[in-house]
Image (cartoon, grey):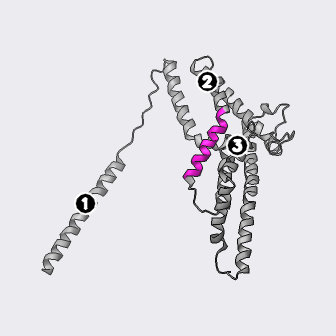
Amino acid sequence: MGRVIQMKSRRLILQLAIIVIVIVCLAQTAHAAPMKLELDVGNPENSKEAASTVRVLLLLTVLSVAPSILIMMTSFTRIIIVLSFLRNALGTQQIPPNQVLIGLALFLTLFIMSPVLGKINDEAYKPLADEKITQQEAIDRSSAIIKNFMLKELYKNGNKEEKDLVLFIKLAKIEKPEKPQDLPLTVVIPAFMIHELTVAFRMGFLIFIPFLVVDMIVSSTLMSMGMMMLPPVMISLPFKIMLFMLAGGWNLTIESLIKSFAGYG
């Protein structure tokens, strides 16, 4: 009986080994197969076909860097950082999860940027689709609209000399133009990003204060009761959630975020 079981086990092992060898061989064959990528630009004499192909390539390139564009030149940076500060201040670890925070930040970004996107659609995309302007003119108009949005945020508080913008003007070693709109995007974009980080950290500091007070009260209460071994964070978490909900925390946070942008305050 033992020999029969041993023979069956050997046969099973042999079959599994053969299957593994076949799979490996097939994988190597598939890997060795040459990949062909053909890009047909159409008839070289037909400029319209070539232009349409180049336009598709440019569109794919823009889509590949779309996340970076979203982060750099819109309100997304400030929103996602403030929401992350809020979650850390509450001490709820991964609640709300990252997917929820990113989704909320995306829709808030769409809400805040809707006037800018509408202006781009009316002044750049529609004329381009109707073949009233060239592609370069559409890009220039879109860039100017985005630049105006970023400059409004940089000069929102009425500062004549925006320090982040001045910093990058000095680093770029260029002369300051009479109008900020004449500055290149290579100067405006990094200045805008630094400004967004600064504003987001200021808002995060203000968000942390009430929750820090709750932590201090709970910690001192536990120490006075002699419960030094009990983690204060575990006890203060329900109180922080209750305080946040009673104060209408989500409404206050979202309202403050939206009003912090020019045109909504």
What residue span does the magenta drawing correspond to? 99-114
Amino acid type of the residue tagged 2 in the rendering: Gln
Magenta-colored stretch includes residue 107: yes
The residue where tag 3 is placed is 258
Q: Residues within 10 Å of mark 2 (few under 14, many from 20)?
A: some
Amino acid type of the residue tagged 1 in the rendering: Ile
The residue located at (76%, 56%) in the rendering is 206
The residue located at (54%, 32%) in the rendering is 59
The residue where tag 1 is placed is 19
Q: CA distance from mark 2 to mark 1?
A: 56 Å
The residue where tag 2 is placed is 135
Q: Secondary structure at mark 1?
A: helix
Q: Secondary structure at mark 3?
A: helix
| Mark 3–mark 1 CB contact (< 8 Å) | no
- Would you say the magenta stretch is mainly helix, strand or loop? helix
Q: Earlier in the sequence, mark 3 or mark 1?
A: 1
Amino acid type of the residue tagged 3 in the rendering: Ile
Q: Earlier in the sequence, mark 3 or mark 2?
A: 2
